[in-house]
Image (cartoon, grey):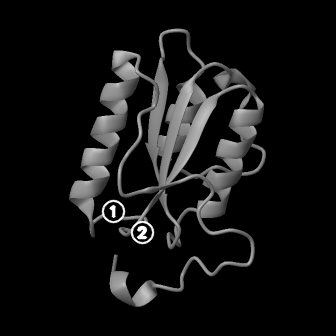
Amino acid sequence: MGGRAALRAGGHPAVRGVVVLAPWCPPEEPVAHLRGKRLALLHDARDRTTDYRGSREFSERARRAGADAQLLTMPRGRHTMLRGAGQWYRTAARLTRAMLAGSGSGSVPGLVPGPGPGPGADPGADRGADRGA
C-alpha cells in the first residue's frame, strides 16, 4: 500500500512527481489532486497481488485530470519484484532522477510504455518464465 499512499501524497505542493511500483489503485482512487504532477507507475502485467489493469486505468484517469502520467509495463517480477529486481531498481532510480532534475518523467529503453496488454489479453500468459515470483 506504499504506492497508493505515495499517490495520495503526490498532490502536496512540495512534490514534483511520484514513482510507484505495482501500486493498488482501486477505481474510486482520486486523481484530481495530481493535476500538473509527473507520475510513473511500474507494473508487471502478471502481478496477481495488485491489479495491473487498476494501474492502467489510474494512469489514464490521471492523464485526463491533467497529470503527466505514464504506465511502464515491467517484463517480469510480478508483485514481489524479485525476478528482474535490478531492472525494477534501475528504472525507478532513473525515473526519480529525471523527475528531481525537472526533465520530465524520463523514458526507459526496453520497457513497454503505455497501456500494455489490452482488453481481452491474458496478462498471465507467460507465467512459466516467472514462476514463484
Residue 8 in the figure: left or right of residue 82: right
Relative to the observer, which residue lies in front, 75 or 20?
75
Left or right: residue 55 compared with residue 17: right
Q: On the image, numbered disc 1 is attached to which residue?
A: 81
Taking depth in this image into account, of 68 and 55 the one nearest to the observer is: 68
Crowd band around label 2 with a 10 angstrom C-alpha radius: few (<14), some (14–19), many (20+): many
Residues at marks 2 and 1, CA–CA distance in whole angstroms: 6 Å
Looking at the rendered structure, the kind of residue marked 2 is Arg
- Examine the rendered structure and indicate whether residue 119 appears above or below residue 122: above
**Which type of secondary structure does the marked residue at label 2 adopt?**
loop
As displayed, is residue 97 above or below residue 47?
Answer: above
Q: Secondary structure at mark 1?
A: loop
| Quarter of the image where one finds residue 92 | top left
Q: Position of residue 87 (x, y in %)?
A: 27, 56
- Residue 44 is situated, as x and y percent measured from the top left of the image, at 47, 64
Q: Residue at x 47, y 18 (%)?
A: 16
